[in-house]
Structure formats: C-alpha cells, structure tokens
Amino acid sequence: MSSNNKNRSGTPRSQRQLRVGEEIRHAMSEILNRTSFNDPNLESVIITISEVRISPDLKNATAFVVPLGGADLEAVTKSLNKANGFFRRELSHMLRLRSCPRIGFEPDTSFDEAAKINTLLQSDSVQQDLRHDDDDALIDSQAGDDEADS
C-alpha cells in the first residue's frame, strides 16, 4: 500500500526497499496480533500498520500506524516507540536480513487527509463548479455535433 514511492531526495524507492518494507509490515502485524502489552495505551487496542518505509541502506524503517476504535493516536505512537527495542528483537528472529533496521513509529494521517479531501469534493461549491463544467462540456460537444451535421 505504498502511497509514496519516492525517497525524500525525490528518487524512486528501489524494488528491494519496497519488498523489505512490506515484509517488515507483515511481520510487525503478526507481532502485534500475538503479543499482549502491559502498557495501558496498547492494551486491547487494534493497531493497523498501513505502510513501512525503509531507508536506502535498509538500516532505518518508519512504520505508519493507525489505532482502530478511537484510541489516542499520539499516545499509541509514543508507546510503540518506547517498545521499539522489543519490535526490533522480534523482527530479527523473523526476517532474513543481514541487520535488523531500527524501527520508528509515526501516526498515519493519510486516512484523515483523504476524508478531508472527500468532504471538500462533496461540498456545494465544488459540486456547483463541477455541474457548470459539465454543462460547458455538453454545450461544446453539441456545437461540435452541429458543425459535423452541416
């Protein structure tokens, strides 16, 4: 689900970066499903890892997380970052990599941004502009049909 296939420098992510990031995402999901945490912010919270971006040298990874069920996003992210040593140890047992990357967790706000854009697109002013553009296109196509008939 990599929505951004470019590094910060603007160069495309390599196939290896994408593949390793996806492997880490699956492994992290498995760890989250089978582990119970003593942290109250992580207790009985379902966490979705939407994407893992990994650096070109495969030494650092950023996991974008979304807690389901209305849990506090910042508190969950902070708690996951406190447990990043645990995740790194577990990942080192699960993955076949020369060295296990350092894991950092960040809140994924892409779903909020998508909802905000959708709300804007459904607003009356945008719908009015879209209807106006459709009317112009219909008039232009009818004018083209009239010219073709003559």
Image (cartoon, helix red, strand yellow):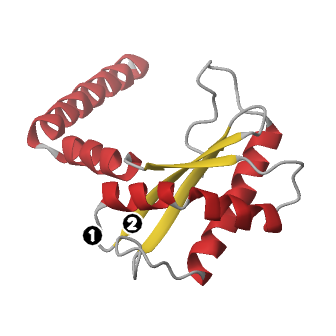
Quadrant in the picture for the C terminus: top left
Q: Residues within 10 Å of mark 1 (few under 14, many from 20)?
A: few
Amino acid at the residue labelled 1:
Gly
Q: How many numbered circles does the render carry?
A: 2
Q: Residue at x 64, y 44 (%)?
A: 61
Q: Nearer the viewer, residue 120 or 65?
A: 65
Amino acid at the residue labelled 2:
Pro
Q: Which mark is residue 32?
A: none
Q: Where is mark 1, residue-wise?
A: 70
Q: Nearer the viewer, residue 43 or 143?
A: 43
**Above or below — where is 121 with respect to 73?**
above
Which x, y percent locates residue 143?
A: 30, 20
Q: Determine whether the residue tagged by mark 1 lies in a helix, strand or loop.
A: loop
Q: Residue at x 79, y 61 (%)?
A: 92
Q: Residues within 10 Å of mark 2 (few under 14, many from 20)?
A: some
Q: Residue at x 53, y 57 (%)?
A: 50
**Above or below — where is 59 with respect to 112?**
above
Whether tag 1 and tag 2 are in contact, CB under 8 A, the answer is: yes
Q: Where is mark 2, residue-wise?
A: 67
Q: Determine whether the residue tagged by mark 2 lies in a helix, strand or loop.
A: strand
Q: Residue at x 61, y 83 (%)?
A: 34
Q: Quadrant of residue 23?
A: bottom right
In space, the residues marked 1 and 2 are separated at their CA atoms by 7 Å
Which x, y percent locates residue 2?
A: 60, 46
Q: Nearer the viewer, residue 139 or 64?
A: 64
Which x, y percent locates residue 57?
A: 78, 33
